[in-house]
Image (cartoon, rainbow, N blue to C red):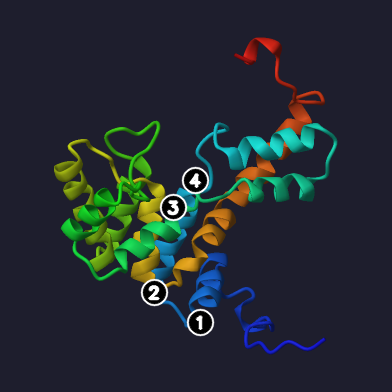
Amino acid sequence: MKFKTNISKQDVNLIGKASFSEAILKMLSGRQPDEKEIELFNAVLVSAMDNGIEAPSVFVPRIIVSTGNSMNASLAAGLLAIGDFHGGAIEACANLLLSGENARMIVSSVLTKGERISGYGHKVYKDSDPRVATIYEVANRLGKMGKYINLAREVEKELEKQFGKKLPLNIDGAIAACMCELGLDVRYGKAIFALARLPAMATHVLEELDLDKPYRRLEESDII
């Protein structure tokens, strides 16, 4: 079986010289990123590492390992918990930002169709997502508050104006804007989220093994 590829061979020259973030960004973009791009991408990865046990990509691996499965099976289950409504808003939001439309047109189009605007709103953070604020700080310091990050911010303001309710840019939306600034293919959205979340999954799996007895089961009182 033969495959044609230009990316299957590891660049051994990166070992010991490039950070993990740099090597990943170089592989995803197909070019050598500059130091500021690497730092922004690193901030993106750190921002999505963990957001509490409540997230499906975190509690699902704990449930799976509690029933006697291996580390890799538990991590696979966590990765499968990432979908259109958990991590998937990154790609959808990036497509909106790359549509060529301004903030008013983007919001108007989405609301007219009665659709949910990806990358905005959060169940916990009603006013602002602190992770987004931190990414803004990093991007501003690096001089990377470019076209797409600014558009994402404008959409947030326009959304409140047209919808009549504040729906803050969430971490998925911020990652989407950063991906656009870095020139990354939007189809990497879920992959980048999964890559960032994987260490947290592994840590939670070990904690489940060390601190709890098998196996996780809903109590009757939890069922309503």
The image quadrant where one finds the C terminus is: top right
Query: Which mark identifies residue 183?
Result: 2
Name above or below for residue 43 compared with residue 182: above
Q: What residue type is labelled 1?
A: Gly
User: Is residue 127 positioned above or below 31 on the image?
Assistant: above
Label 3 to label 2: alpha-carbon separation: 18 Å
Number of marks in picture: 4
Which callout, 4 or 2, points to the residue nearer the camera?
4
Q: Which amino acid does label 2 sit on?
A: Gly
Q: Is residue 188 left or right of residue 74?
A: left
Mark 3 or 2, which is nearer the eye? 3
Which residue is found at the position 23% from the left and 53% from the top? Answer: 107
**Can you tell which quarter of the image residue 214 is in?**
top right
Judging by the rendered image, the residue that carries numbered circle 1 is 30
The location of residue 180, given as percent across then percent down, is 36, 68
The answer, for residue 143, to whether it is visible in the render is: no
Which residue is identified by label 4?
85
- Residue farthest left in this picture: 161
Q: Which of marks 3 and 2 is nearer the N terminus?
A: 3
